[in-house]
Image (spheres, rainbow, N blue to C red):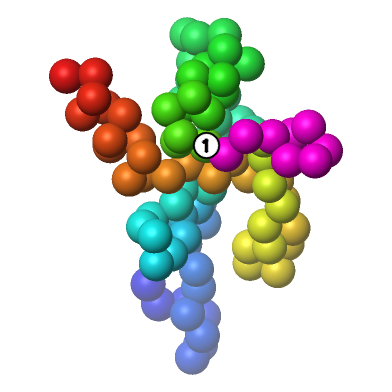
Amino acid sequence: MPGRGDHWCEPVVRDRSGWWDDRPEGRIYLFNADGMREALKGFDFKRGLDLLQEAGVIEPPGANGKRARSHKIAGRVGKFYEVSTDALEAAMEAEQ
C-alpha cells in the first residue's frame, strides 16, 4: 500500500485479537485478553481456559498464577495467551 512520499504505511488494524509466532515446534497464536474472551464467547471464561489447558492447547498458569505470558510485539510488552495450533488440532481430532 503506497504511503506519503517514498514511505510505505502499515495498514491500520482495529480490534486485533492477537498475533502469531512460527516456532520450531509449530505455530503459536498469541491471543490478547479481549481476543481470548471473544474466542470463548458463550462459555464460562475460566472454565474455557481450564479445558484448553487440560487439552494441552495452553500452558498451565505460571508462578504468578496467570495463564497469559508477557511478549514484546512491535516494541510494546503485552500479556498474551499462547495457543498451540498443533495441540488444538490434535484435541479436535480426538473429539471426532
Where in the figure is residue 73, as x and y percent of width and height?
63, 62
Where in the figure is residue 54, as x and y percent of width and height?
49, 24
**Quadrant, the C terminus:** top left
Question: Residue at left 47%, top 41%?
Answer: 83
Q: Nearer the viewer, residue 16 or 57?
A: 57
Horizontal placement of 19 versus 71: left or right?
A: left
Camera sees residue 8: yes
- Residue 13 against residue 4 in the figure, above or below: above
Q: Which residue is mark 1?
A: 58
Where in the figure is residue 10, as x and y percent of width and height?
50, 68
**Quadrant, the N terminus:** bottom left
Q: Is residue 61 magenta?
A: yes
Horizontal placement of 63 versus 12: left or right?
A: right
Q: Nearer the viewer, residue 23 or 55?
A: 55
- Residue 85 against residue 44 in the figure, above or below: below
Question: In the orientation shown, which residue stands out farthest toward the bottom?
Answer: 6
Three-letter amino acid code at the position of disc 1: Ile
| Secondary structure type for disc 1 | loop
Question: Residue at left 56%, top 20%?
Answer: 50
Chain part drawn in magenta = 59-66
Question: Residue at left 42%, top 44%?
Answer: 84
Horizontal placement of 65 versus 8: left or right?
A: right
